[in-house]
Amino acid sequence: MKLVVAILLGGIFGIVLVKSEVISWFRIQEMFWFQGFHMYGVIGSAVVTGALSLFIIRKMQLKSLTGEEIRPRPKPFNKVGNLVGGIFFGLGWALTGACPGPLYALVGSGYATLLMAIGAALLGVLTYGALKRYLPH
Amino acid sequence: MKAFVEWISQPWPWYVAGPMIGLMVPLLLILLNKSFGVSSSLRHFCAMCIPNRMEYFKYNWRAEGWNLLFVAAIAGGAWLATTFIPNANPVEISAQTTAQLQSMGIHDFTGLAPQDIFGWEQLGTPVSLIVLLIGGFLVGFGTRYANGCTSGHAIMGLSQLSPGSLVATVGFFIGGLIVSWWILPFILQLL
């Protein structure tokens, strides 16, 4: 059942990513050149929706269908890691025009050459795994 | 039915898409008690494939199976949308962006990404190698170093008002601005 839910939600997310064209390399360049509002509108309204939902969940003390309390753990605050890692990712985001979700979505949309980008991303993750203890966080 | 398909095939405006993406946060929490995030899937794939040699990959990735199905379904959903409700027109980016990209040597504006860079015929050219291999590597390395990507930090993290996610999101933009303004124009000269 849980796995069916994961597939359904992922599928909906994939459809939205394609239909809103946020996985478009053109849209990413437009965003970073500050020439269009679309991407800011999508990300901004997603954050507002997410934040409002979390507020309501907390206020009403909603439980998840699994019966547990909903207390999403905030990610740890790593000043250097968040910033420097974030910059590295930003460089890749503007080059490929895709963050991880869109990478999968673009491959699904038929942009098969982006499989190479996913392969390279896995190599990047392996490299991070190997270097983690030497890197400042 | 035909009218509905035509209607839904048009590009979805930001005020429809953004809230739908934002709703992933409560839906995942309520239905699965999981936090929205995509880039961790890359770590799970690595953990799956390599033996327990590295500390970073020693954990029970099987417990994160939902995340692997979630990202596989992203590709599946994208295929469905592209196959059954495709947008017949080019992406409506601003005229300014189109002109600027044209002046940099981009000719193909028909799909979601230019064939000049992402087409099969271009595979192996310097530009495609830089974009796909270096770009992809940076996406993987950077998201794990930052411990999250656009979904985990910019959407889930900012929704939680987490300071680390704000710092990471600022980092995403610093990196993106550096490439779009100062590096991409040089790379595209190789086209």
Image (cartoon, rainbow, N blue to C red):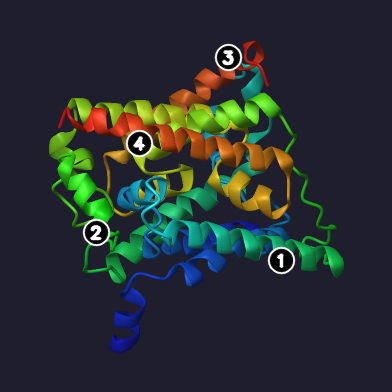
Q: In the rendered picture of this protein, how many numbered marks are placed on residues? A: 4
The answer to whether mark 3 and mark 4 are in CB contact below 8 A is: no
Residue beneath label 2, please? B95
Name the amino acid, label 2. Ala
1 vs 4, front mark: 4
Residue beneath label 4, please? B181
Visible residue check, residue B128: no
3 vs 4, front mark: 4
x then y, percent, for residue B78: 38, 58
Residue beneath label 1, please? A53
Residue B101 lies, with reference to residue A82, above or below; the image says below
Q: CA distance from mark 3 to mark 4?
A: 30 Å
Q: Residue furthest top?
A: A134
**Residue appearing at x 22%, y 53% in the figure:** B98
Name the amino acid, label 4. Trp
| Helix, strand or loop under label 3 | helix
Q: Nearer the viewer, residue B45 or A30?
A: A30
The answer to which of marks 4 and 2 sits earlier in the sequence is 2
The answer to which of marks 3 and 1 sits earlier in the sequence is 1
Residue beneath label 3, please? A131
Protein chain holding label 1: A
The answer to whether mark 1 and mark 4 are in CB contact below 8 A is: no
| Helix, strand or loop under label 1 | helix
